[in-house]
Image: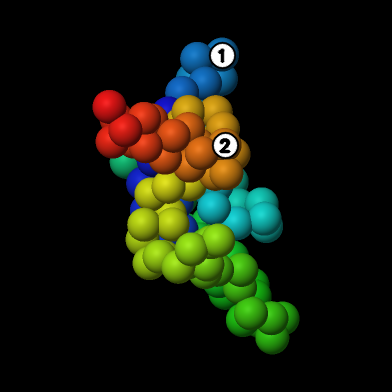
């Protein structure tokens, strides 16, 4: 899985060998934003266009677009660190809580030895 960020939104890019496409999904919001392209450049441009279209659509409807991250967890952190934690957990196939529990447990174990 490869990711890219545009205007604070993270797109996950995946290769679809059957369709000969690079397809993707914005992974850090509940609203569904998808994109695709036959080349890396097309897929990245489509990702940018899809985020822009989403923001324009929300503005036209007078709605606030969903923000990727608030930065609020059981402890306070920055939105950038929150995003990085989410991406690391997603890559590991875990929830944020499960991933943080594992990472913190490993670090605590190292500290107690």
The number of numbered discs placed on residues in the rendered structure image is 2
Q: Residue 17: x, y in percent?
A: 50, 15
Residue situated in front as seen by the camera: 13 or 68: 68
The outermost residue toward the top is 18
Classify mark 2: helix, strand or loop: helix
- Depicted 81 relative to depicted 38: above or below: below
- Depicted 107 relative to depicted 65: above or below: above
> Badge 2: how crowded within 10 Å, few (<14), some, or many (20+)?
few
- Indicate left or right for 45 with 35 as reference: left
First in residue order: circle 1 vs circle 2: 1
Q: Residue 10: x, y in percent?
A: 45, 51
- Depicted 91 relative to depicted 33: above or below: above
Q: Which residue is mark 1?
A: 18
Nearer mark to the viewer, of 1 and 2 = 2
Determine the residue positioned at 69% across, 81% down. 63
Image-quadrant location for residue 78: bottom left
Determine the residue positioned at 28% across, 36% down. 111
Determine the residue positioned at 60% across, 56% down. 29
- Indicate left or right for 6 with 86 as reference: left
Would you say residue 22 is visible in this rendering?
no
The outermost residue toward the front is 112
Q: Residue 52: x, y in percent?
A: 49, 66
Q: Which residue is mark 2?
A: 98
Q: Residue 39: x, y in percent?
A: 36, 32
Q: Quadrant of the N terminus?
A: top left
Classify mark 1: helix, strand or loop: loop
Would you say residue 85 is visible in this rendering?
yes
């Amino acid at each position: 899985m490869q990711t890219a960020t545009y205007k604070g939104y993270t797109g996950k890019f995946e290769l679809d060998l059957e369709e000969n496409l690079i397809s993707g999904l914005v992974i850090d919001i509940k609203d569904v934003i998808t994109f695709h392209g036959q080349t890396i450049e097309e897929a990245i441009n489509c990702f940018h266009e899809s985020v822009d279209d989403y923001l324009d659509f929300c503005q036209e409807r007078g709605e606030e677009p969903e923000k990727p991250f608030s930065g609020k967890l059981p402890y306070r952190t920055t939105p950038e660190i929150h995003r990085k934690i989410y991406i690391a957990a997603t890559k590991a196939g875990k929830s944020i809580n499960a991933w943080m529990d594992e990472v913190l447990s490993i670090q605590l174990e190292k500290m107690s030895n």
